[in-house]
Image: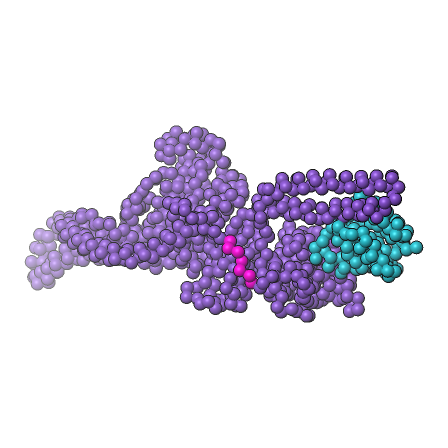
Chain colours: A cyan, B purple
Amino acid sequence: MKKILIVDDEANIVISLEFLMKKEGFHVAVANDGEEALELIASFAPDLVLLDVMMPKKSGYEVCEAVRRNPERAGLKIVMLTAKGRETEIAKGLALGADAYITKPFSTKDLVAKVRSVLGDA
Amino acid sequence: MRDSWNARLRFMLAAGVLGLLMTGPFMLTAVLLFADAKEVERAALAELLLPRLPLGALMTVMGFVIGLSLLRGLFKQYVQGLLRMAETLRLMLGANRNFRVAPEGPPEVRELGRAANDLAQQRDELLTDVESQIARAKSSVEEEKNRLAALMSELAQAVVVCNLDGRILLYNNRARLQFKALAQGPTSMSGGALIGLGRSIFSILERSQITHSLENIQQRLRRGSSEPTANFITSTRSGQLLRVQMAPVLAPGASEDAGESDVRGFVLTIENITRSFERETQRDQVLHTLTDGNRSALANMRAAVEMLGDNPDMEPEMRARFIGILRDEVTRMGSRVESVVNEFADSLKTRWPLEDVLGIDLIAAAQRRIEDRLKLATKTEEMDGNLWIRADSFSLILAINFLASRLQDHYDIRELRFRLSSEGGMGFVDLIWSGTPLSSETFYTWELEPMNIGAETTPLTLRDVAERHGGEVWFQREKAAHRVFIRFVLPVAATPEAEPEAQTQIQQGHRGESRPEYYDFNLFSFSESGVDLDRRLVDMTYSVFDTETTGLEPSAGDEIIQFGAVRVVNNRLLRQEIFDQLVDPMRPLRPEGIPIHGITEDMVRGQPTIDQVLPAFHEFCSETVLVAHNAAFDMRFLQLKEDSTGIRFSQPVLDTLLLSAVIHPNQETHRLEAIAERFGINVIGRHTALGDAFVTGEVFLKMVPLLNEMGIHTVRQALDASEKTYLARVKY
């Protein structure tokens, strides 16, 4: 069973994402800010991170950058999930090593499809 | 001076000749008689003459004295009288055409005086005729000038015209008001001393931004652009934001394809956008809450709705939670929209002015700066030569320079490369170096700290610059090449050099009477700053001043109670550029002084004290030559304040009293009224400091051409000549 880490500081989206991913058969953990995310990436060892950009303590960009610097976590997939929809921000996320960038609001079906395709088990 | 010396010498000579004439023939006759006479006759003669010799000598001496006084009278009337008349005639020739010789002395001299007066009369009539013709010819030029002045005064924008050295040639009332509002502290007393004809614009605006914009304009001119203007935003010391548009002033006759050498100066249109900028920031926040804020809310709702819809057989507890999310998000969204509607109503539409820049020009400018300032080698790689970006080039180049300086300091890089590319609507400016990769913590610190490069400081951060452009900045590794680069993402310009929207609007309708005197186009040929003693008198900027004091003895505790000063630039007295300030002497006034200066206790109480006024006055006078009548008196008061205020007036001082003695050594008096009368200047408002400063200023302007005639052309020569006059030796 693949493991997914959901990183977002907004409870209202975390509830839905957690419910959705569990229903899709993933093992799910939740982090509420950037620092917690880095800790869970180490301890929980997820296969994929659903990463919000705007968060307290460490932004999604910083988390992404830190993960990509660590060669041990090279296989970790990152899907950025954010309300920042400008072209330049998307370019920045991808440049910093995200595998996909999904702008809010999104369809849950598309999200599941994107997660599966990034994980390579579509 | 030399003439009167010669006259004195001739008088001595004449007295000598008179002496010889009176004694010579008598002595000669005596000698001849004596030689001709026999022994006996000689004895008889001696017997006869010797006892009477004292009487003869007495008579001769008396005769000589009478002759001498006659000679002296003649000398006074014919020689000195004529010399005085010659001075008057010179006055009539130049400084005061309406002056006439006062007929005095012997009839012949009087007749000469009358003839000279008649001649002057005839000359005046001829001149008046010529003048009226010239006036007619000039009036059309004048009309054009007035039209320009009227236009300027009615512009809603503050306009300042400068020459290439940054000296102000023209400004309108709006500019004066704007800078007056900006001036803080003591400067505000001097009526906006920051701005003034002949003063440097760099005391108000950052020199580097002006030079940068000028470079941009010249680049555009070289490319043959039809809109060679530049925009920039600057902040003043008091934290106000100014939006400045710069347009070049081209040499007359410069054609469409003007080269950089044809730029003679520049026009600045200045707008205080502090308030509108605040509104803009507010508007951005509003937009942000409307878009990004709602995106999140929509995402939360959409996800919840989809979970509810896709899972009809959900546990009731879970269902209640999803419905709770929906209720929560809908309420929050509603209140958000409500507040946006309220705030958006009074937000104005203003934008940070970005201009279209050719990417390679921008990088070339950045390279020059990095190589000059940091001595760091630069190179370019792939460069998209046709890429136009929308940018505020000043802050962008500053940011690039800042990064280069940080990289040099922290990672000791030897070379920085540039790359320019684009993708869709995004332009990429990359700064590339090989070797040590950057740590992300360091980069985040750089992003958020104010960009300081050596002595250059700005409150702006790298993040601000990126946001100002609606762009981004990040760093990335090129693993294969072992290189790192920092990438700026900037908006690509839609159409190269799109016509910028008209920024100057001329207010129609209101035709004010105001005719600003705030221009002086002759300053275009004016250059350099500071006080250079070897510059010509006519080219200098002067602060002509006067003070009123409680009494005449500064060392006995008398104090200044009023300052009045006016500026003289390019041979003109600028009645708008004045300093007029009462001072509280912090001691009672002398009752005997009140009728003279007309300043009463009530008027000075509560006025600023000398230690507040002196700094403002010093600022008003900076970079100018001081002029005063009997300057030694005023300077003595100022010098006594040096220790307590720490303010020194070190600039050269010209004294109209001494200069008058240089020009008219034979006149009896050099009082200000007398000099003014000699020059035909109307004296109004004497014995207010400002009134006296005006009179002194006009007197000084009349003196300059007379000094030139005497071979005194520079400030140094004028100072030397003043020092040599006898009046200067009278110590105050």
Which residue is at 42% across, 42% downward? B564
Q: Is residue B367 left or right of residue B661?
A: right
Q: Position of residue B95 (x, y in %)?
A: 29, 52
Foreground of the two, B351 or B94: B351
Q: Is residue B561 above or below residue B405?
A: above
The span shown in magenta is B497-503
Q: Position of residue B436 (x, y in %)?
A: 78, 63
Q: Quadrant of residue B347?
A: top right
Q: Is residue B276 above or below residue B36?
A: above
Q: Is residue B659 left or right of residue A43?
A: left
Q: Position of residue A72 (x, y in %)?
A: 88, 60
Residue B301 visible (yes or no): yes
Quarter of the figure with the N terminus of chain B: bottom left
Foreground of the two, B545 or B53: B545
Q: Position of residue B557 (x, y in %)?
A: 46, 35
Q: Residue furthest front?
A: B312
Which residue is at 75% across, 41% downward? B329
Residue B707 visible (yes or no): no
Q: Is residue B316 left or right of residue B597?
A: right
Q: Is residue B619 magenta?
A: no
Q: Quadrant of residue B403?
A: bottom right
Numbered marks: total? 0
Q: Is residue A96 above or below residue A83?
A: below
Quarter of the figure with the C terminus of chain B: top left
Which residue is at 25% across, 57% downward? B133
Which residue is at 69% across, 48% downward? B291
Main secondary structure type of the part rendered in magenta? loop
Q: Quadrant of residue B481?
A: bottom right
